[in-house]
Amino acid sequence: MNRLVVVSNRVPLPSAGNHAGGLAVALDGLMEKRGGLWFGWSGAIGTGGNNVSVEQADGIDYATIDLTQDEHDRYYNNFSNGVLWPLLHTMPELMHFDRRDAKAYRDVNARMAATLQSLLRPTDLVWIHDFHLMPLAACLRARGVTNPIGFFLHVPFASADVLAAAPEMGSLVRDLLAADLIGFQTENDLANFAAAAELFGDAMRGPGNLLTMAGRKVRLGVFPVEIEPHGFADLADKMAAGPEASRLRASLTGQHLIFGVERLDPTKGLLQRLAGLRLLLEKHPQWHRRATLLQIAAVSRKEVSSYRALRTALDRDAGCLNADLAEPDWLPLRLVSRAVDRTLVAGYMRVARVGLVTPLRDGMNLVAKEFVAAQNPADPGVLVLSRFAGAAQQLDGALRINPHDADAMADAMDRALAMPLAERRERWQSMWAAISDRSPLAWGRGFVAALLRASSIVAVPDRPLRTGTGPLALMEPDEAGLVTDLMVAERTGEREKLRGPKLVPEGVQLN
Ligand code: F6P
C-alpha cells in the first residue's frame, strides 16, 4: 500500500492537543485507519530554518516546522486569512492585498516543499489541503517531485471575476494545476475553478472533468466532506442527559431553544442572523418569552482586522437587540464568544428546537450535518440553513434561506418554531437519509482512490482480482479499496512493464 502523506497548515499534534477544525474532523478517521505521514505547521513561532519536529502516535508520523513571527503575520494572517479567505468566500471588500504578503505566502510554501521533499518516499501519495497551500504542488514539481499529488479545497472557490481582484490569483490557479487531482466540496466550486483554469491557465475542459493544458492532464472532482453521523448521534444522546445540557434545559423554563455555533468569522453571517432574530420578534411577537437564541461565536483569527471589527459590531448589535427587546424576566439572545467543547455542543444541539446555520458563504459547513445527527428522531428540531452553504446541496429537508434577506430568515424561524411534529420528522428523516450512510473515512478513501486513478501509475479495477490460479488468483484491495497495477506488478514480478511513460511518472521507483 502506498504511504499517504497529508499536508495541511494546521496539524493535530497529539502532544499539543492542536486543533485543526473541520479539516481534522474530516481526516482523522482515514489517518487512524491507514497510518502515514502528516506534515505542516507546528502551531509554534520559532526562528525559521529547516528544522523538522517529528512525533509518532498510532501509526501516524507527525512532522512539523515552526513559522517565524513575520511568516505567521504575512503568510497566515495577512495573505491566507486576509486575502484568500475573503476572496474565496466571495467577499472581496474584506480583502487587504499587499505584494509583500503574497511573497511571504509563496516563500513559506517553498520552504514547506523543500522540507517535505526530504521526507518523501518514491511511492508516497501526497494529499495537500486547503487555501494556505495553493502553490505547494507547483513548488514540489519544481523540485522534481513526481509522486501523485492531490489537492482538496475545504472552502468555496469563487468565480474568476471575483478572484481577479487579487493580482496573485492567476498564478495561484496555474500552480494548483500542478496537482493530478483537485477536489472541491460542490459542483459550483468545481465549475468556478474550471472556468478560472481556462481563463488563467490556458486549460481546456474535456469530458469527465478533465483539464488539459500543454500536454498535461488534471482531473477535477467533487468530494463533499462528511461527518461520522452515528458517532455524533450517540454523543449527542449521551451529552443531552449530562449536567451541562440539563442546566441549559432548566434555564430555558419551557422556552424553545434556537441554537447557533461557529467561529466568529465574517463569512458566517452573524450580524445578518441577529437582524433576522430582531425581525422574528418584531413580526411575530408571540415568540417573546417563548423562544431564545443561544449563539456561540468563538473568537478566532483576532489578529486580522476584519475579525476584530466583526467582534465589535457583533457585541454592539447583540447589546442593542437585548436592550431593545428584552423583558425584565426574559432575554432574546445569549451570546457566548469563547469556544465551547464539541461534546457539549452535541448535547446543546439535541436540546434545540431550531438550528441556525446561515453563513453568507461556506464550503460545506459540518455544523449543519452535526445538527441533523444530534437530533432525537422521535422529536427532532428543524434546521434553518443558508442556501450558500455547501451542505444545502445535500440537506433538502432544511428550511433553506438567503441570509441577506432578514424577512426570509425571520419567517423561517417562525415556521420552524411552530412546525408540527409530523413535518419535523419528515424533514429530519430526509436529511438523516442524506448523511447517515456516509463518513469521513469513506470520503477520504474516495479521494485517495480517485487520486490513484488520476495519477498515471495505476489502472484500477475496484474489486479484488480473481483470474483463476497463479499469483493473481486473489489480491486484497488496499485501503482505498483498490487493487492497483503497482500491486499486481509487485505480485507478478513484472514491475519493469509499468515503467512505460503512461503508467509511471518519471523518477518513481517501484521497489
Ligand atoms: O474551513 C477551513 C478551515 O481550515 C477549517 O478546517 C478550520 O476549522 C478553519 O478553517 C479554522 O481555521 P484556522 O486554522 O485559521 O483556525
Image (cartoon, rainbow, N blue to C red):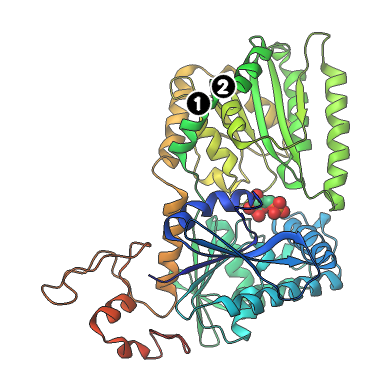
Would you identify the image quadrant in which residue 90 lies? bottom right
- Image coords of residue 16 (percent x, y): 66, 52
What amino acid does circle 1 point to? Lys
- Which disc, if any, is residue 312? none
What distance separates the C-alpha of mark 2 from that of mark 1? 7 Å
| Disc 2 and disc 1 in contact, CB within 8 angstroms | yes
What is the quadrant of the N terminus in the image? bottom left
Question: Residue at the spot x=47%, y=54% of the render?
Answer: 32
* Residue underneath mark 1: 238
Residue 199 in view (yes/no): no
> Does ligand 1 reach within 8 Å of label 2's beta carbon?
no
Q: List the residue tagged with mark 2.
A: 242
Task: Answer above or below: position of 147 versus 406.
Answer: below
Percent x, y for residue 24? 58, 52
Residue 281 in the image: x percent, y percent?
75, 19
Please indicate, yes or no, whether residue 145 appears anywhere in the rendered image: yes
**Element type at mark 1:** helix
Q: Nearer the viewer, residue 121 or 193?
A: 121
Q: Which quarter of the figure has residue 339?
A: top right
Tally the marks: 2
The type of residue carrying mark 2 is Gly
Residue at x-position 65% and y-position 24%: 258
Q: Residue at the location (34% across, 65% down)?
A: 478
